[in-house]
Amino acid sequence: MLWTGAGLVLAQTAALPPPAWTPEQGVAIRTYAESQGKPPFVDPSLKLSVGIKLPNNVTLFPLPETMKIPSAELYTYGIVNDRAVVVDRMTRKVVHLWE
């Protein structure tokens, strides 16, 4: 019975709509990455778009604690080809990117 309850919570969490990402959040992610010395990933052959699954050699990081969004634990970020990207933690698919 405990497993059923945990599955229900997981299903409810997964059903939440994704956050509405703002330009300010993109700037905050880039600034945070630079201040923390997080290395960017560069591969000119990688064409970024929402929904693309990032290769395993792209290093992703937890969102900054200052980024207050619903279900922040579901997402990671990276700087890829000079663009800030937010990625679904489970699938490694890009959910948002900034120019």
Image (cartoon, grey):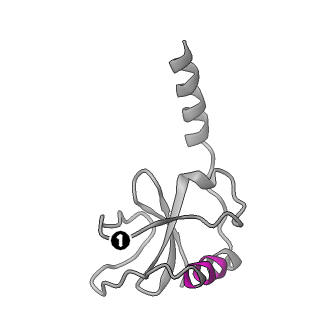
What residue is shown with label 1? 58
Q: Is residue 28 magenta?
A: yes
Q: Residue at x 35, y 63 (%)?
A: 53
Q: Main secondary structure of the magenta part?
A: helix
Q: In the displayed structure, would residue 13 be above or below residue 7?
A: below
Position of residue 36 measured from the top left corner of the image (x, y, whole percent): 57, 79
Residue type at tag 1? Val
Numbered range of the magenta stretch? 27-34
Position of residue 48 measured from the top left corner of the image (x, y, whole percent): 39, 76
Give the total of numbered labels: 1
Direction front: furthest residue = 36
Q: Secondary structure at mark 1?
A: loop
Residue toward you, 16 or 83:
83
Viewed as shown, does residue 17 lie left or right of 78?
right
Label 1 packing within 10 angstroms: few (<14), some (14-19), many (20+): some
Q: Residue at x 68, y 53 (%)?
A: 70
Position of residue 10 measured from the top left corner of the image (x, y, whole percent): 55, 34
Quadrant assignment for the N terminus: top right
Viewed as shown, does residue 95 lie left or right of 91?
right
Position of residue 68 measured from the top left corner of the image (x, y, whole percent): 72, 61
